[in-house]
Image (cartoon, rainbow, N blue to C red):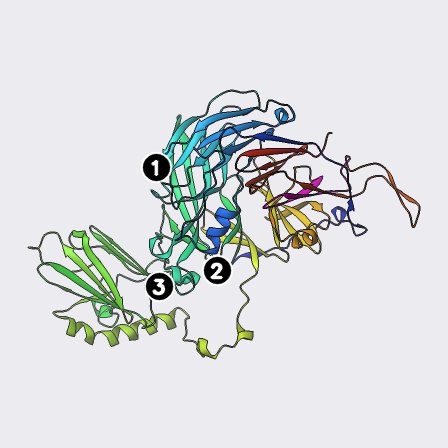
Amino acid sequence: MEQLFELRPRKDLLDPTFEGYKLSLNSLPVYKHDVPVAVEHLKPNDEQFSFQHVKTFGLHNHLIDDPWHDEIAFFISKDLQIFKINLHSLVSQSPEFKSVWQIPRHLESRNGWFNASLSFAGPELAVVTDGGGVLHILDTGVRTPTNSHLWQAKLTSEALGKSEPFKITHSMLNTIESNQSETLSILALKVESLDKVESQVALSVFGCSEKETPFINCLEWVQYEHVDGHWSFKQLKRLAIPHGLDYASVLSPGKALCLIAREPLGIIFDSNKDVATPLANSTTTEDEAETKIAYTWMESPEEVTVWITFDKQTSKHDLVVKIESQALKVVYKNQTYLVGELAHPISVESSTWTLSDGKLEIILSKVDKSLSWNHLIQSDLRGRKVLDPETAADYESVINMGMKETQAESGGRPPVFSSEQLEECDDMPMDESCIFRFDGETNEFTHKAILSGQLLFFTQSAPGLAPAFCLRHDVDGLIWQPMGDELEQSWGCLHTAALQALGYIQASKEQRKFTVAPPNMTYAALCDAFSHVYIYRQSTCTSAGVEMVHRPTGRRVGNIARQQVLNIDSPEECLGALATNSFLLLLTSSSLFAIRVNSD
């Protein structure tokens, strides 16, 4: 059970006397430059029509900042080149755009791929994907504006699935001093068809149904290990998040995750261990086996047929059937129902399974047709061998009775009413987002907090920390920093800054595409998809303006909060936005705009 915690704002960061923003007509220096190669901007195809597809493509930020160096930024061009931008050169007539690496293109057509994404895991390490299923681990060297070092690929991997599009959401490099090794954690977001997800538990546990949507959002947590100068695959975990993911990050030192999403959600795959509830009491005595029949099976010279009876309402999404050359596994929802080594090898390609009216039929094709099977699963006496399908049907009532007894022993009980008796007022609200801490060692959610305000945006933090996120609190926007696990106190999120009235302002901007803020939080910028940019300087910003007098009281105001509106001279859609302490960068398909917000 998750431990509930609260997001407690710091009162010293709130300003109850805030009087609003004053419109400033002062102009800001805007520098426009053509990019060397047009920016990549892929769009979903006709088969990618879910809401998460729209978010993944439409809200993809093509400008990438570097937490270790605030004087450079990056973008990926249409021909998959990674360009480094020297920010200080943007105020001159000769901006510095340097290509640091070319992403290999293994297929000519990129239909259905996500936009390429880049993430910096360490001061000299980056991870990048072409958006089509290939992951690259890169040695970047020391990334500075003047460093001309070209990046080098250290590992190219398809561990997340060949030709399966994904987007990198976060990465983190952690050093293990005890054995002088490094562990690289990468989070990748996928939007997959229900039938293509590799899962160790049934997806119906999380309410997945093709009647609602044929897609599911999966967060892949993949780890690589660096030992003796070589990178190698370590582990892969997969979490199912049916109702969409808003935020995901790796918590230092790389043993837990921080997520913002709606319930239900949970882990469905672990490459190192099974996440399904283990099978209990599969080794029974012969006397017990007479009354605890779990399945029936029959063999012919060519094949072995297995029958398992479930509730008649059971669908294919309630089951996970894994057939291997000499092993069989059946999971019902999140409970392992049948697992073990088969008596003899089978042909996986010729084997299949079907489900009809709650009756699962598995057909296993023999490799050696001369062998007779004395048992199906070694050391599992819960099966009954029959001569024909009619005899198997006679055991169905015995199996159904055994299932009811198992439910009673485990505390389960049938519902006292059906779903048809529920009215609209009885339905549990599903629109509440929560923040979770997921422990990678136990595969459980350890902490949970219900978000009382809307998620506005998230932004980079100091190197080694998870990105911070901004939540609406009353009319303000509050910045929260997820804690690392090195601290001995109970896990939570720290309130680090406040952006006055940002929640109220953002709600009124219907054409907004990006919201960004610099590390020092002296301003926030809301960027429309086309033309307009709204900058809201906080009263703590020393560049806010001259000293003013409050007329009703005669009180002198040193700095006031000010609003500035800019009209960008471009008909193209805004594809990226990035805020530094001095510059606000906007990226379109062919141009880069640098707005000098602060001169100090």
Q: Residues within 10 Å of mark 1 (few under 14, many from 20)?
A: few
The kind of residue on which mark 2 rests is Pro
Q: Position of residue 218 (x, y in %)?
A: 43, 51
Q: Are marks 1 and 3 in contact (CB under 8 Å)?
A: no
Q: Is residue 349 left or right of residue 138?
A: left
Q: Position of residue 126 (x, y in %)?
A: 48, 32
| Magenta-drawn stretch contains 526 | yes
Reply above or below: 166 against 153: below
Q: Which residue is mark 1?
A: 108
Reply above or below: 398 against 59: below
Question: How many tags in the picture?
Answer: 3
Cα–Cα gap, marks 1 and 3: 38 Å
Q: Secondary structure at mark 1?
A: loop
Residue 479 or 292: which is nearer the viewer?
479
* Residue span colored magenta: 522-543
Q: Which residue is mark 2?
A: 264
The kind of residue on which mark 3 rests is Asp
Which of the two labelled residues, at mark 2 and mark 3, occupies the earlier sequence position? 2
Q: Is residue 560 left or right of residue 299?
A: right
Tell me which residue sits at (34%, 43%) in the image.
163
Q: Are marks 1 and 2 in contact (CB under 8 Å)?
A: no
Which of the two labelled residues, at mark 1 and mark 3, occupies the earlier sequence position? 1
Q: Which residue is mark 3?
A: 318
Residue 241 or 132: which is nearer the viewer?
132
Q: Residues within 10 Å of mark 2 (few under 14, many from 20)?
A: some
